[in-house]
Amino acid sequence: MARIIAIISGKGGVGKTTTAINLGAALNKFKQEVILVDANLNTPNIGIHLGAPIVPVTLNHVLKNKADIEEAVYEHSSGTKIVPSSLSVKELTKFNTKKLSEIAKKLGKLSDFVIFDSAAGFGPEAMDTLQAGNEIIIVTNPEMPAVTDALKAVKVARELGKEVKGIIVTRQKNAKYEMPLSSIKSMLETNIIGVIPEDDSIKKSLTKRDAVVHTHPRSKASKKYQEIAAKILGGKYEKEFQNKSWWSRLFG
């Protein structure tokens, strides 16, 4: 049975899409079949980030019953599969996003992991994405407004009976104005499963239309995303990766 993970955030701009892409890429790197779904229908970015901004069939077509979900799946050069949403302004109409749960089940038959990149906030689009996930990962920055919104996300997810897998804190700079990780964990009453440092490699990976785990595998951000993927897999790949020599990791 595939694991369906919804990546959500209470606040926009915290690195949710970057996290969805790199978590999916890291899991794929660990020999898992991954399908990444861009459920942020109003401001989709996964296709742009991975070099497929315009494709013949998108999630929008599926939600409008104009195509089957299998027709909207595309394979990135890395092996990670994606379901992009449309960038067309003409497509900014109402969708039956309640179909996302049905779509998740269908995609689950084709992969080991289905990862949904949700819209920020708690609108109908985000709530239906939340409903589609069996496991929820919440992304936040180490700043009070973002953490406050993350707390709302935790409460909403739990009220829906969803398993909150954990919190990923992104863009950490170790600055004095940032909230300490201990305070974030205490406030959210949820485990922090990963901390991603501020890293220029992420911005560079965007220009290369790929995940940072591929473009800069030795960067701090890449290593952290791979550690998170290993935790999600129960840690069974983490030791194997760390024990490899630098040379074998580079060419493996």
Image (spheres, rainbow, N blue to C red):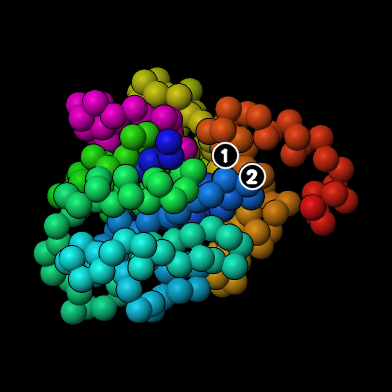
Q: Which mark is residue 193?
A: none
Which residue is painted at 63% across and 29% down in the image?
Answer: 235
Q: Position of residue 178 (x, y in %)?
A: 47, 37
Residue at image mark 2: 30
Which residue is painted at 14% across and 57% down in the image?
Answer: 96
Q: Position of residue 148 (x, y in %)?
A: 29, 35
Which residue is painted at 35% across and 79% down in the image?
Answer: 56
- Graded by Cα atoms within 10 Å as few (under 14), some (14 to 19) or many (20 or more), the crowding at tag 1 reads many
Residue interval drawn in magenta: 152-168
Which mark's residue is nearer the viewer, 2 or 1?
Answer: 2
Residue 29 seen in this snapshot: yes
Residue at image mark 1: 229
Rendered-image quadrant of the N terminus: top left
Which residue is painted at 15% across and 62% down in the image?
Answer: 95
Alpha-carbon distance for marks 2 and 1? 8 Å
Residue 14 seen in this snapshot: no
Q: Is residue 235 left or right of residue 140?
A: right
Element carrying mark 1: helix
Element carrying mark 2: loop
Q: Position of residue 103 (x, y in %)?
A: 28, 52
Q: Is residue 130 left or right of residue 252?
A: left
Q: Is residue 84 left or right of residue 210?
A: left
Q: Is residue 58 magenta?
A: no
- Graded by Cα atoms within 10 Å as few (under 14), some (14 to 19) or many (20 or more), the crowding at tag 2 reads some
Q: Is residue 239 left or right of residue 19?
A: right
Q: Amino acid at mark 1?
A: Ala
Q: Are the residues at dot 2 and dot 1 in contact (C-beta closer than 8 Å)?
A: yes
